[in-house]
Image (tube, helix red, strand yellow):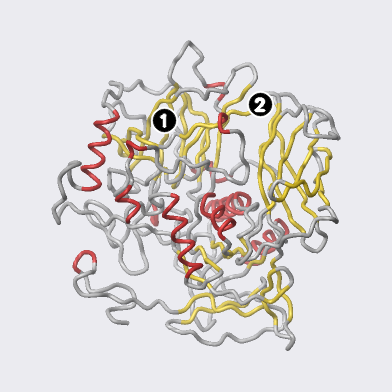
């Protein structure tokens, strides 16, 4: 299979059910429900009660502490800046989270609905309690969203362009602005955006309309979906979780936001590589321009706690290497000392700018001086190393499901509590299992100091696997469109998380689920991101990657040593402890069993 296509076109988009690019039918009625009425309806659905009345047992949802505290009238959910590794000014962005109209229609009726079913609280998936809907989507449905918005204060049609960002939408989405289809995206775990400038209505104070159509067949489709399962554990209202399988998540499940950028040219993406051995920070930026020019340049400044420790300039066509000052004692990032360096990237008209003055665009990011590698201990045993020192990595298998928000945590505070709790228990690693989180999660890991082994969620399919390695060097075969979808989404995930220092390892396959073209995929990972490690977790092992990884339940058990790779016990335990009378739904325990 080809992992290096000659075109940047998204092959995953070819599978989207396309609506003709014409005007959408006008909605019969504008949404006249007041914000207060929306809040009260949401409160009754989520908490099963009015504001001053306690819910009955039949009405009660399993809410977290943060879900119980969530008050839409006090502010938008997840209103924090959604892209902390590439920040523009506060006036340049608008959060579109909050109440949207929604409708669920059969796919035979491919045209947009004239009437909507009600309101949904974005960014919570429609199956979740916190969405205010808690409704299942099937392979025979389209999920529609609609809302209106005003242009950002800093936006000027003469000097600005407007981007519409989606943190994540599961799975296939078509976006319409003011009745016109502006773009399509397939992939439930990677962010995407569209330039919507030419679709805007500039007549007076006109409101802009955004409509989103989503298709998500979960495990009846071909897409990566991790632990989401719709069959056979189903109910009429919502999918019932069982054992290691969990309720599906459909539609918008991360922040939706607007960003105003300079019209002439702007920094679209940046790639930051710290080098502990050379004491450098290298920045590569991709630039989008209204009219192509060859004379744009970059000025990069690195600071630590407000002190400038290095700067450099260069062309936008090449990496810009910043050598940290010899007078500065480099602060290495570790779980115990999570030091971060601020990185400012300025775009200029001159090809080699000498300062940050008179820039066309600027973004602010950060990095950490940290190195992850494999080395030998005093006995010649291969070990995982951080900053050239052996470090025993000990962590949790974090699957990132919330009882009230499912894929979407109820708040940033909840995320921070989860990460800090892992640290408080003595762990220094989170293996993010079969799920990809929002950028805010990895930003918190960077700040709080915990390493992340990042899984790629598996796609559907039946594959042979055995914990003792009986099926090593064996893999499945995928259709071209399934393979293309997986590889495209894997690339989107890796590129999206590239600048977060806490991410130290990629795990593209787990226990043989959906495993295919292993050698090709590892060749691409090692080529695109040589600063991180990669390996297969639990099998099927192909003798490549940085580690030999086995799963032992309940364990723990010894994993054999290898000459060229570290040895990892990727999973063990899985023990549950169910307390009678405290199990949700009346059961006596799930995976692991009562009293295990």
Q: Which of the 4 quarters of the picture holds residue 117? A: top left
The correct choice, above or below, for 33 with respect to 239 in the image is: above
Q: Which of the 4 quarters of the picture holds residue 62? A: bottom left
Indicate left or right for 66 with 557 as reference.
Answer: left
For image coordinates 70% across by 48% down, the residue present is: 271
Residue 161, image x and y in percent?
61, 25
- Observer-nearest of 496 and 297: 297
Q: CA distance from mark 2 to mark 1?
A: 25 Å
For image coordinates 72% across by 68% down, the residue present is: 387
Indicate left or right for 309 with 4 as reference.
Answer: right
Crowding near the residue tagged with mark 1, few <14, some 14–19, many ≥20 C-alpha atoms within 10 Å? many
Q: Is residue 472 visible?
A: no
Element under disc 1: strand
Indicate left or right for 298 with 147 as reference.
Answer: right
Indicate left or right for 3 with 469 as reference.
Answer: right
Number of callouts: 2
For image coordinates 77% across by 42% down, the residue present is: 300
For image coordinates 35% across by 37% down, the residue present is: 74
The correct choice, above or below, for 6 with respect to 351 in the image is: below
Farthest-out residue, top = 204
> Which quadrant: the C terminus?
bottom left
Element under disc 2: strand
Residue 436, image x and y in percent?
50, 55
- Observer-nearest of 318 and 248: 318
Q: Which residue is mark 1?
A: 211
- Observer-nearest of 541 and 2: 541
Instruction: From the image, state whether disc 2 or disc 1 is nearer to you.
Output: 2
Q: Is residue 517 visible?
A: yes
Residue 541, image x and y in percent?
59, 75
Q: Which residue is mark 2?
A: 262
């Amino acid at each position: 299979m080809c992992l290096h296509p000659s075109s940047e076109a998204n092959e995953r988009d070819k599978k989207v059910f396309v609506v003709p690019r014409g005007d959408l039918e006008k909605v019969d009625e504008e949404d006249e429900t007041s914000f207060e009425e929306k809040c009260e309806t949401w409160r009754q659905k989520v908490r099963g009660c009015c504001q001053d009345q306690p819910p009955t047992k039949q009405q009660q949802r399993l809410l977290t502490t943060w879900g119980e505290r969530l008050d839409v009238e006090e502010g938008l959910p997840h209103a924090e800046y959604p892209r902390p590794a590439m920040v523009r000014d506060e006036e340049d962005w608008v959060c579109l989270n909050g109440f949207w109209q929604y409708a669920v229609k059969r796919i035979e009726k491919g045209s947009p609905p004239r009437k909507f079913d009600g309101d949904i609280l974005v960014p919570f998936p429609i199956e979740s309690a916190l969405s205010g809907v808690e409704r299942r989507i099937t392979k025979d449905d389209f999920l529609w969203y609609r809302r209106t918005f005003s242009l950002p204060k800093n936006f000027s049609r003469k000097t600005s362009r407007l981007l519409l960002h989606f943190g994540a939408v599961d799975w296939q989405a078509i976006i319409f602005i003011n009745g016109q289809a502006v773009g399509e995206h397939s992939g439930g775990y990677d962010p995407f955006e569209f330039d919507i400038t030419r679709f805007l209505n500039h007549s007076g104070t006109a409101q802009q309309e955004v409509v989103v159509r989503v298709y998500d067949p979960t495990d009846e489709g071909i897409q990566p979906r991790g632990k989401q399962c719709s069959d056979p554990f189903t109910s009429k209202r919502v999918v019932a979780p069982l054992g290691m399988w969990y309720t599906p998540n459909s539609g918008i499940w991360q922040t939706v936001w607007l960003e105003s950028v300079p019209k002439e040219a702007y920094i679209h993406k940046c790639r930051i590589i710290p080098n502990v051995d050379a004491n450098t920070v290298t920045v590569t930026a991709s630039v989008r321009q209204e009219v192509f020019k060859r004379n744009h340049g970059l000025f990069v400044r690195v600071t630590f706690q407000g002190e400038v420790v290095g700067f450099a300039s260069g062309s936008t066509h090449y990496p810009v290497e910043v050598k940290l000052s010899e007078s500065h004692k480099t602060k290495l990032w570790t779980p115990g000392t999570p030091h971060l360096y601020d990185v400012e990237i300025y775009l200029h008209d001159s090809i080699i700018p000498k300062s940050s003055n008179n820039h066309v665009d600027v973004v602010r990011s950060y990095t950490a001086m940290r190195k992850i590698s494999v080395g030998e201990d005093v006995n010649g045993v291969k070990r995982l190393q951080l900053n050239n020192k052996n470090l025993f990595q000990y962590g949790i298998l974090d699957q990132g499901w919330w009882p009230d928000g499912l894929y979407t945590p109820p708040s940033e505070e909840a995320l921070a509590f989860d990460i800090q709790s892992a640290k408080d228990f003595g762990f220094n690693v989170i293996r993010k299992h079969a799920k990809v989180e929002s950028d805010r999660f990895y930003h918190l890991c960077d700040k709080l100091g915990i390493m992340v082994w990042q899984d790629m969620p598996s796609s559907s399919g039946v594959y042979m696997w055995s914990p003792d390695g009986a099926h090593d060097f064996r893999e499945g075969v995928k259709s071209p469109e399934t393979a293309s979808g997986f590889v495209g989404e894997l690339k989107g995930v890796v590129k999206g998380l590239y600048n977060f220092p806490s991410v130290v390892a990629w795990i593209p396959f787990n226990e043989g689920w959906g495993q295919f073209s292993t050698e090709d995929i590892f060749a691409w990972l090692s080529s695109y991101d040589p600063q991180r490690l990669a390996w297969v977790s639990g099998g099927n092992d192909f003798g490549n990657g940085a580690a030999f990884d086995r799963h032992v339940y309940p364990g723990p058990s010894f994993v054999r040593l290898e000459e060229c790779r570290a040895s990892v016990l990727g999973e063990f335990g899985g023990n549950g402890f169910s307390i009678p009378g405290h199990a949700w739904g009346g059961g006596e325990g799930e995976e692991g069993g009562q009293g295990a």
